[in-house]
Image (tube, coloured by chain):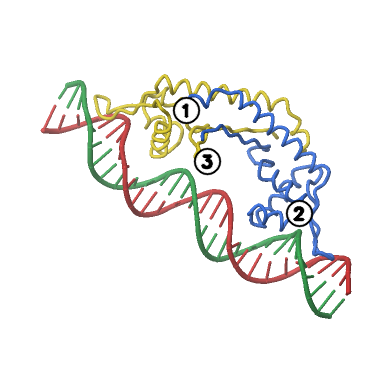
Chain colours: A blue, B yellow, C green, D red
DNA sequence: AAGCGTTATGTATTTGTATATATATCGCAT
DNA sequence: ATGCGATATATATACAAATACATAACGCTT
């Protein structure tokens, strides 16, 4: 079945900062409380997930995710209020664009 | 400088059919009258451009581009009226989405 | 101090995509 | 019939991105 799809992201001088990948990752971290588990659930390598969080935190004045190592349970990951806010805003943007494309005629032109 | 960027495309069961690449390619073909030249202008390999046109034509009831080989000038490429229509529709969609994202708040959240 | 599960980090391997290269084909003009 | 510039097509190579793997460090609990 044919469909129009979209992707949106925030970039800084050509470097991708925040997009669908980070958005989903943060949601999973919020749910799992662990970067290791979140990455596993997404079928993403831990390294990729870790690098992603570093890039995100380094490019925002406030961190989006706080990683803690050691301790009783070995450590964990916590999404900050700011992180949740970014996710909510991104979801909103994505939804508005999706609503928009549903009012388009492009699809009719390609069999 | 931070900015929101978007990409939209038409896909069929996960297979990408039409997006920014094909859109630009068709415009260049229309301008140059030749697939070879259009690919060169875009810095795209001829093979990639040729494959793209095949996929496009095979997935639309009417062809978007007609390739002619042989003849006085060796051949050439012509964009059909239908092809131009698709390009116009895609440009319109892209513009509407761009207008939409300029009214968003996501950017303010990421430093 | 021992154990646990997690974060932290670098390196090697694999995978997939893009490109380069080479060659064949076509058909009109001269 | 020869030359030209374009399309047509397969294969080999190069490059980039993702992943797998291995290992260290951490700090709380018992």
Q: Are marks 3 and 1 on the same chain?
A: no
B80 vs B57: above or below: above
Mark 3 is surrounded, within 10 Å at the Cα level, by few (under 14), some (14 to 19) or many (20 or more) other residues, namely few
The spot of residue A53 in percent (x, y) is 72, 50
B43 vs A80: above or below: above
Determine the chain carrying the residue at label 3.
Answer: B
Q: Are marks 2 and 1 on the same chain?
A: yes
Provide the residue designation for mark 2.
Answer: A32
A76 vs A60: above or below: below
Mark 2 to mark 1 CA distance (whole Å): 42 Å
Element type at marker 3? loop
Determine the chain carrying the residue at label 1.
Answer: A
Mark 2 is surrounded, within 10 Å at the Cα level, by few (under 14), some (14 to 19) or many (20 or more) other residues, namely some
Q: Residue at x 49, y 29 (%)?
A: B24
Q: Nearer the viewer, residue A31 or A85?
A: A31
Report the label total: 3
Provide the residue designation for mark 3.
Answer: B14
Q: Are marks 2 and 3 on the same chain?
A: no
């Amino acid at each position: 079945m044919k469909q129009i799809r979209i992707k949106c992201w925030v970039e800084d001088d050509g470097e991708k900062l925040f997009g669908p990948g980070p958005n989903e990752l943060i949601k999973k971290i919020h749910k799992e409380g662990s970067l290791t588990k979140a990455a596993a659930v997404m079928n993403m390598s831990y390294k990729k997930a870790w690098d992603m969080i570093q890039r995100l935190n380094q490019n925002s004045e406030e961190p989006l995710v706080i990683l803690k190592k050691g301790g009783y349970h070995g450590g964990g990951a916590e999404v900050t209020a700011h992180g949740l806010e970014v996710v909510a805003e991104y979801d909103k943007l994505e939804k508005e664009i999706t609503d928009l494309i549903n009012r388009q005629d492009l699809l009719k032109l390609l069999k």
